[in-house]
Amino acid sequence: MELWYTERGIVPGLGLSVQVTKVLHEEQTEFQHLAIVDTKIFGRMLWLDNIIMTSIKDEFVYHEMISHVALNTHPNPKKVLVIGGGDGGVIREVIKHPSVEKAILVEIDRRVVETSKQYLPEIACGLDDPRVEVLFEDGIKYAQEHKNEFDIIITDSTDPIGPAVGLFEGSFYKSCYEALKEDGIFVAQTESPYHDAELIPKIQKNIRSLYPITKVYLAHIPTYPGGCWTFTMGSKKYDPEAVDLSNKPTFDTRYYNHEIHKAAFVLPNFVRELINK
Ligand code: SAM
C-alpha cells in the first residue's frame, strides 16, 4: 500500500503531495507538531505542524542562499545571529566562513534541534562546532535584549503562524536593526511571491523604513509553495549587488556561486511590482 501525504500549508487551496516511505519520528512538542519522514522523491524531510520545513534533496538551496549572500556582502563578518533554524542548515553554511568567530542560534523549540541532530546529521552537522552557541529561547525577546552586537542577523523562521508570527512584525525588525552593529546586515526568508502578495509588501515597508539599502532576491525551492522563494536583506552600509566578490570564497556550495549572488537580485516584473506596492 502506498502512503501519500499532502501538505496543506498556509496557502488555502494549495497542497504538495509526497509519497512517504517511512515515518521515523512524530511528536507534539511544547510548540508544534514535529515529524521526520522518509519520502520517495525528496529523501528525508522535517515537517513542523504538517508544513514542510526542509528536505535532504533541496535543503542546500535555501540554506546556502539565506547565508552566503549576506556573509559575502559583509567585508568581515565575525559575529552572526541565527533566529529559528533549529535544523542547523544555516549554521552549517555560516561557519564555512573563516572570518566567523561566533555564531549564535536562538531556536524556540529544543526538540527541533535534538531531532535534527538525530535524524538529519547532514544538515545539523555544524551545531557542535566550538564557534557555535545554541540557545533555546524566543528569538523575538533575544533580539530585543541585544544592542549593537552582531555583524549579520539571519531569520530562518517558520511561516508566520504560532511562535513565528512576531518574526514578521515591525517591532522585531526594529530590534534586529538595533542588535546589529553600525555596518550590519539583516536577512530573512520572506515567503512566496506567488502566494504571499499581502505579506511581502508589508515586510518591504518595514525593512525599508529602517535600512538605507533594502534588497529582495530569489531562489527556486521545489518543496516550498510555488517553488520560488523570496529573501529580503536590509543592509546598513554594504550593497549586495555592488560588492566585489572576486576575492570571496565559494566553498563547496551546490547552488550559490558569485554569478548567482548577483543574478538572484534580478527580479521579474510582478515581483518588482509586489515589493513596491
Ligand atoms: N526553512 C524553513 C521554512 O521556511 O520552512 C524554516 C526552518 S524551521 C527550522 C524554523 C524554526 O523557527 C523552527 O524550528 C521553529 O521552532 C523556529 N521558531 C519559530 N518561532 C520562533 C521564535 N519566535 N524564536 C525562535 N525560533 C522560532
Image (cartoon, helix red, strand yellow):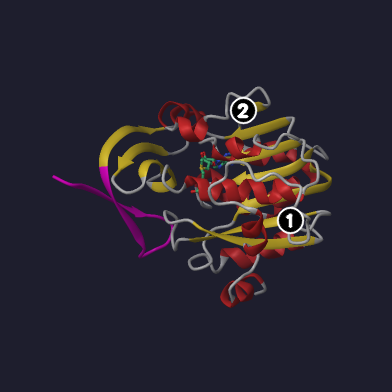
- Per the image, the residue denoted by label 2 is 134
Q: Which residues are magenta?
A: 1-20
- Most extreme residue toward the front is 246
Q: Quadrant of residue 35?
A: top left
Quadrant assignment, res 218: bottom right
- Residue 135 in the figure: left or right of residue 144: left
Pick the front one: 166 or 18: 18
Placement of the C terminus among the 4 image quadrants: bottom right
> For numbered disc 1, what is the local secondary structure?
strand
Quick one: label 2, few (<14), some, or many (20+) residues within 10 Å? some
Quick one: SS at disc 2?
strand
Can residue 203 be found in the magenta stretch? no
Is 212 on the left or on the right of 259, as rendered?
Answer: right
Residue 90 on image: x %, y % = 59, 40
Q: Which residue is mark 1?
A: 234
Q: Find ligand 1 in the image and state its quadrant.
A: top right
- State yes or no: residue 8 in magenta: yes
- The answer to whether the residue bearing label 1 lies less than 8 angstroms from the nearest atom of ligand 1 is no
Displayed quadrant of residue 274: bottom right
Q: Vertically, is 68 above or below 35?
A: below
In the image, taking residue 192 as reference, residue 208 lies left or right, namely right
Q: Amino acid at mark 2?
A: Val
Taking 238 as reference, is 197 left or right?
A: left
- The residue at the point 76 percent across, 35 percent down is 99
